[in-house]
Amino acid sequence: MFNPPFPQMIKGLPQADVPLPGVQAWLSQGKDHQIVFFEIEPTAKVPPHSHGAQWGILVEGEMSLTIDGKTQRLKPGDSYFIPEGATHSAVFHRFCRAIDVFADKDRYKSK
């Protein structure tokens, strides 16, 4: 499988200030939403938390995503939806690239 890195048009976007070790992200800011392009090391873990609605797709890697106590193992091409207020967490089994759309326009700030 061919997994090119995110191109310069994405890595040239503002970096998102994500307070998790092993996570880099680039931010595309909309008027009423955010699109975030993530690169995540297999050492990273996202602790349980909640916020507005989130939709995403795993571009590369393998991860386990738990939403309201139900865990699914995701592979490239799998998409997911996290409803507003749902408690969720993630564990990354391999290096991952993901694209997430957040209903919260201010979910992340730029660095």
Image (cartoon, rainbow, N blue to C red):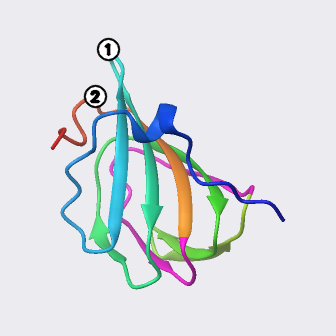
What segment carries the magenta color? 77-95
Position of 19 compared to 46: left or right?
left
- Which element type, helix, strand or loop, lies under badge 2? loop
Mark with earlier residue (2, 1)? 1
Q: Which mark is residue 47?
A: none
| Residue 21: x %, y % from top left | 25, 74
What amino acid is found at the position of numbered circle 1 in the picture? Lys
Which one is in front, 85 or 16?
16
Q: Which mark is residue 105?
A: 2
| Residue 107: x %, y % from top left | 25, 41
> Which residue is depicted at the point 42% across and 41% down?
11
Q: Is residue 94 magenta?
A: yes
Q: Is residue 109 magenta?
A: no
Q: Which residue is mark 1?
A: 31
> Which residue is depicted at the point 23% across and 56% down?
18
Above or below, 108 against 43 in this view is above
What amino acid is found at the position of numbered circle 2 in the picture? Lys
- Local packing at callout 2 (Cα closer than 10 Å; few below 14, some 14-19, many 20+) is some
| Residue 62: x %, y % from top left | 63, 75
Position of 18 compared to 85: left or right?
left
Q: Residue furthest top?
A: 31
* Residues at circles 2 and 1 in contact by the CB criterion of under 8 Å: yes
Q: Which quadrant of the figure has residue 4?
A: bottom right
- Which element type, helix, strand or loop, lies under badge 1? loop
Which one is in front, 87 or 17?
17
**Residues under labels 2 and 1: Cα distance?**
7 Å
> Which residue is depicted at the point 36% across and 43% down?
26
